[in-house]
Amino acid sequence: MKIYHKFLLYQNKLLKPYIHIILGLVGALTYLASLALIVGVVYEHGFPLSVDEIAKIQVLYKAVWVIFLIDVTLHISLEYRSTKKQYRGLAWILSVLLYLTLIPVIFYQPEEEGAILQFWEFLHGKFYHLVLLLIFSFLNLSNGLVRLLGHRTNPSLMLAVSFLAIILIGTGLLMLPRCTVNGITWVDSLFTATSAVCVTGLVPVDVATTFTTSGLVVIILLIQIGGLGVMTLTSFFAMFFMGNTSLYNQLVVRDMVSSNSLGSLLSTLLYILGFTLVIEGIGMVSIWFSIHGTLGMSLESELAFSAFHSISAFCNAGFSTLSGNLGNPMVMTNHNWLFISVSFLVILGGIGFPILVNFKDIVLYHLRHFWGFVRTRKLEKHRTLHLYNLNTKIVLIMTFLLLVIGTLAIAAFEWNASFAGMPVADKWTQAFFNATCPRTAGFSSVDLTSLGVQTLLIYLVLMWIGGGAQSTAGGVKVSAFAVVVLNLVAVLRGTERVEVFGRELSHDSIRRSNATVVMSLGVLFLFIFILSVLEPQVSLMALTFECVSALSTVGSSLNLTPKLCDASKLLVALLMFIGRVGLITLMLGIVKQKKNTKYRYPSDNIIIN
């Protein structure tokens, strides 16, 4: 017994280092297996395969399956206590589902017909195996990506690199033979992938005739990933399924998704995904009702059309499966509800997830208040005064003003021009739609080259301002623009503080807003200047329009994108990347941060005016 107790006492001390080494090696092998599985699935569905190649891919799938089984088994058997703490309920469920794949291996196929045979065939089927292995692969890779944050990786640089990685993966996918009708150059593929991930909408080719169904699926997946944000998705998977993220990881992710606290971090991620799926689902149904039985499509094609445009609209991407975008003759008449549905999806996607969460809190507050009145027949004496936070108020007011002013101005300038011959209802619908899309969706219903100069200038302003912060929209953001205007008003009035709605704006908010505006104008000037050298035959208006559209991730163009040379396309793609990642975020990842010093220099004034 003494020897036994000594073994129990020292086993952890003796074996733990070796256990960590074994689990580390298996973990590294699991990451490689996850990548290999995804590459295998892409290769299988992207290329026409021979019988021999199909057999080799099946061997790859079996090898990955064995590695995942070994990984889960070793974690449970060798480090059960830590695994129990790290794994969430869903991770245990997935582990059980993985072990169920052993049933067809252990037991022979039942001879009698019935539920048992169907269950055995389902567990033995390729669909069950492949979906489960893909889920495990994405979880492993997401967990590994979030773990990198634990090594004090620069969060801004991590965000930029994650977007770049998805763009490169998307570029490769779009070049697969089964994704295009007659092939595509690597520059056009890179440009399209960048536009999709950066939810812009600028494309050098006609999407409807260039890409197959597989290609369109790749594009919409890139749009969804880009709209939500790579780190948002990976953080959600890592925290929701595994739950083994460090405190530093959670602090970084909290800042990325603007969560109020660490306790509400997971709920914030759930709200972001939940709002996205619910709004896109409602939008899909609304679009389907507007086009059902009018486009000569089958039910499956109508649902696919509705889903594609709902995701594209909410993510402010501006991609369409129709030739000529939404200006296609098939939808230009008797489809006002389609344009209204797309417009509201664009608005909801562009106001930002923090505002949607605030809306949720307001609705729940009123529901609780109403239920209390129904239950007690008495009104509550103490009510919350500030239901709408300052950010929500500024974004909603600015969004409302930009939409109203934009709609009225575009209607006034285009009523008897590009809208000539339309019914009055169609004119107002098109005016509202064309005031909504520059902020920053990129859908088009009329040829932008037919618009007047005044309307194009309105487009430029709306594109440059963009949508709300922490949203799928781009631009300098309405909140930053509002802060700059409020600061200007304070300077003109001679006040030292910038105040609005009974609140004083922080010095940091004013500094970041001013920096964003200045950097945006500086980057635009630089790229317009370079493109004017590369494209001397193009008008300055068209180049400016293209650059503002790219940096603000809008997607509107004066039909210039397909005419650009390869070097210009790469520059515009870089501009889209900068606009999606964010100027401040990108510079924080590149420029070395200076430590705060405890001393201050004497203040002095510079002569201005």
Image (tube, rainbow, N blue to C red):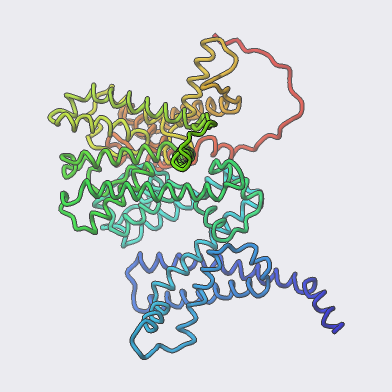
**As drawn, 210 above or below 15:** above
Which residue is located at x 76 percent, y 74 percent?
15
Position of 90 compared to 293: left or right? right
| Picture quadrant of residue 558 | top left
Residue 537 visible at all = no
Residue beneath the point at 64% across and 66% down: 84
* Front-lying residue, 180 or 23: 23
Give the quadrant of the C terminus.
top right
- Inspect this view and state whether residue 122 appears: yes
Identify which residue is drawn at 32% across, 69% down: 48
Between residue 86 and residue 175, name the one nearer to us: 86
Task: Determine the residue positioned at 51% across, 35% down.
Answer: 583
Image quadrant where one finds the N terminus: bottom right
- Image quadrant in which you'd find residue 131: bottom left
- In the image, residue 156 sits, relative to residue 60, either above or below, namely above
x, y percentage for residue 33? 52, 69
Percent x, y for residue 495? 57, 12
Q: Residue 311 in the image: x percent, y percent?
A: 35, 48
Indicate left or right for 609 with 81 as reference: left
The x and y percentages for residue 389 are 51, 31
Task: Report the number of discs.
Answer: 0
Left or right side of 434 for 515: right
Q: Nearer the viewer, residue 165 or 488?
A: 488
